[in-house]
């Protein structure tokens, strides 16, 4: 029964720090985890720095593989696992994006079965210059960058779906797929992460051999959200976005029996602005 978790740690060195007397960071949560594989995003560290931060977990037997970004302090993805991967692949075969710490995947044997698990940190993007008059030159660059990544990553995922292999990609997808996936959807129609072209891309993905594990299980209802702004009362009011989720190939998705968000009980117990999201497969 593979258990796969995804979490944007918002900087691994910050995530492991003790925040207060009740919040000792990521490591106690990790020690209590039942997951077989944990996909990490926004690691923002070199491999050595990530290993130093996660030292107690590695001493306890976890295995770590990383794909840092060539831009210091930016992006970076990783996979923690109970068993050593049989193969590791960083990137999606892109000359533009493969050294920017956006994607890593590994093959595992879990319960005697072969499984590929990936960790994705999809670019946030920016406002659509055609939908707003306030777009800056930087916005245009970031908007175009996300469109290029979506095109290349979509082709990459299509090849996985056609392979017949069981694949699950956990990550910060930086897209809320539907109105059910963002609390304040009415005021975010022009916001990056909820733009028409982004949602159309996800819809196409879920029509072409991939499944949104959480949405398939919870059905047509709001949430559960996985990211909340640090500002204001967003967390307390559960005014969040569901942008962290698992996409699984069809045969594996049919085996999903449970998915949940490990939302902290209080604001001051958070060690990231995202919460861990877990999918359990039978």
Image: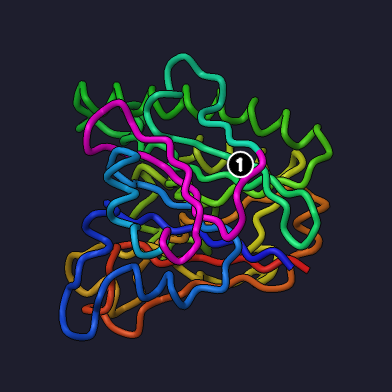
**Residue 8 or 223: which is nearer the viewer?**
8
Q: Secondary structure at mark 1?
A: strand
Residue 5 figure quarter: bottom right
Which residue extends farthest front? Answer: 59
35 on left or right of 31 = right
Q: List x then y, in percent, for residue 56.
A: 35, 64
In this rendering, the answer to whether 93 lies above or below 113 is above
Q: Is residue 175 magenta?
A: no
Quarter holding the C terminus is bottom right
Q: Is residue 84 magenta?
A: yes
Residue 187 figure quarter: bottom left
Quarter holding the N terminus is bottom right
Residue behind mark 1? 106
Q: List x then y, in percent, for residue 125.
A: 35, 35
Q: Residue at horizontal 46%, vertical 55%? A: 243
Q: List x then y, in percent, for residue 123.
A: 39, 36
44 on left or right of 260 = left
Q: Residue at horizontal 43%, vertical 42%? A: 121
In this rendering, the answer to whether 136 lies above or below 165 is above
**Residue 34 or 212: which is nearer the viewer?**
34
Q: Residue at horizontal 68%, vertical 49%? A: 108
**Mark 1: few/some/many CA within 10 Å (<14, 14-19, 20+):** many
Its colouring scheme is rainbow
In this rendering, the answer to whether 34 lies above or below 138 is below
Number of disc labels: 1
Q: Residue at horizontal 40%, vertical 48%? A: 41
Q: List x then y, in percent, for residue 78.
A: 45, 45
111 on left or right of 260 = right
Q: Which residues are magenta?
A: 58-86
């Amino acid at each position: 029964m593979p258990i796969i978790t995804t979490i944007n740690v918002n900087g691994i060195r910050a995530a492991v720090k003790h925040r207060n007397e009740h919040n000792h960071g990521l490591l106690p949560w990790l020690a209590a985890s039942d997951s077989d594989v944990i996909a990490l995003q926004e690691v923002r560290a070199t491999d050595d720095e990530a290993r130093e931060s996660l030292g107690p977990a590695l001493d306890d037997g976890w295995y770590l593989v990383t794909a840092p970004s060539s831009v210091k302090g930016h992006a970076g993805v990783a996979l923690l696992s109970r068993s050593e991967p049989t193969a590791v692949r960083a990137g999606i075969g892109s000359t533009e994006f493969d050294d920017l710490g956006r994607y890593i995947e590994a093959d595992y044997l879990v319960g005697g079965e072969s499984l590929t698990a990936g960790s994705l940190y999809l670019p946030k993007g920016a406002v659509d210059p055609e939908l707003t008059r306030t777009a800056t030159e930087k916005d245009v660059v970031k908007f175009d960058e996300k469109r290029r990544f979506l095109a290349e990553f979509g082709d990459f995922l299509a090849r996985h779906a056609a392979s017949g292999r069981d694949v699950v990609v956990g990550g910060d997808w930086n897209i809320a797929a539907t109105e059910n996936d963002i609390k304040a959807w009415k005021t975010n129609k022009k916001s990056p992460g909820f733009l028409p072209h982004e949602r159309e891309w996800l819809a196409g993905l879920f029509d072409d051999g991939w499944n949104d594990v959480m949405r398939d299980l919870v059905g047509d209802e709001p949430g559960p959200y996985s990211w909340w702004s640090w500002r204001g009362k967003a967390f307390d009011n559960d005014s969040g976005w569901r942008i962290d989720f698992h996409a699984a190939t069809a045969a594996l998705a049919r085996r999903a029996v449970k998915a949940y968000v490990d939302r902290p009980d209080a604001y001051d117990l958070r060690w990231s602005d995202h919460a861990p999201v877990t999918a359990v497969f039978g």
